[in-house]
Image (cartoon, rainbow, N blue to C red):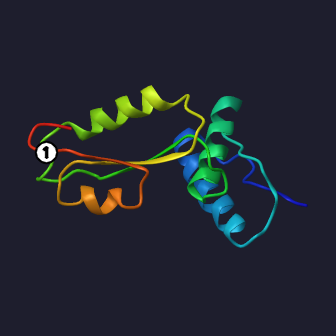
Amino acid sequence: SATIGITEAGPLELGTIKSSIAVGSLLLDDVGDTIRISLTASPVKEVIVGRNILKSLGLLKEGIDIISCPTCARCDIDLIKLVKEFEKRTKDIKKYLKVAIMGCVVNGPGEAKQADIGIAAGKGEG
């Protein structure tokens, strides 16, 4: 049994990136069974980052897993605002669901195949 993590990884954003790379790669190689995230941030943020790393690796199946596109010229809605609002409204849901939120009908149906719920925007609607 081994605890893995980066001691003093740094501030929230950069420390999250460093921890995700280090902890994620070790867990994928089956090294360690306990993680410790150490950030210059509140302990609550450390726990959130740790849980998100586990979720991203498929090791923790709870809450809403959002798949969304980076937007492009085909996107006719404010997808960034829509995704943020969706995250806010679903943050307390514990049941695991994969939700695809796509900005157009070109990529939406394909991404939604892998999701439990798919949302694809049309002209000015999402």
Local secondary structure at mark 1: loop
Which residue is at 36% across, 61% downward? 113
- The answer to which quarter of the image holds residue 44 is top right
Front residue of this view, candidates 98 and 83: 98
- The answer to which quarter of the image holds residue 51 is top right
**Image quadrant occupied by the N terminus:** bottom right
Q: Residue furthest bottom?
A: 29
Question: Could you tell me residue 62's position as x and y percent?
Answer: 61, 43
Which residue is at 51% across, 31% downward? 91
Q: Is residue 8 above or below residue 27?
A: above
> Is residue 113 toward the left or the right of residue 16 in the image?
left
Question: Could you tell me residue 15's position as x and y percent?
Answer: 60, 47
Question: Could you tell me residue 19's position as x and y percent?
Answer: 64, 53
Which residue does the numbered mark 1 point to in the structure image?
122
> Is residue 27 toward the left or the right of residue 115 in the image?
right
Q: Which amino acid type is shown beneath numbered disc 1? A: Gly
- Label 1 crowd (10 A; few <14 / some 14-19 / many >=20): some
Q: Residue furthest left?
A: 123
Question: Could you tell me residue 122's position as x and y percent?
Answer: 13, 45
Q: Is residue 125 above or below residue 110?
A: above
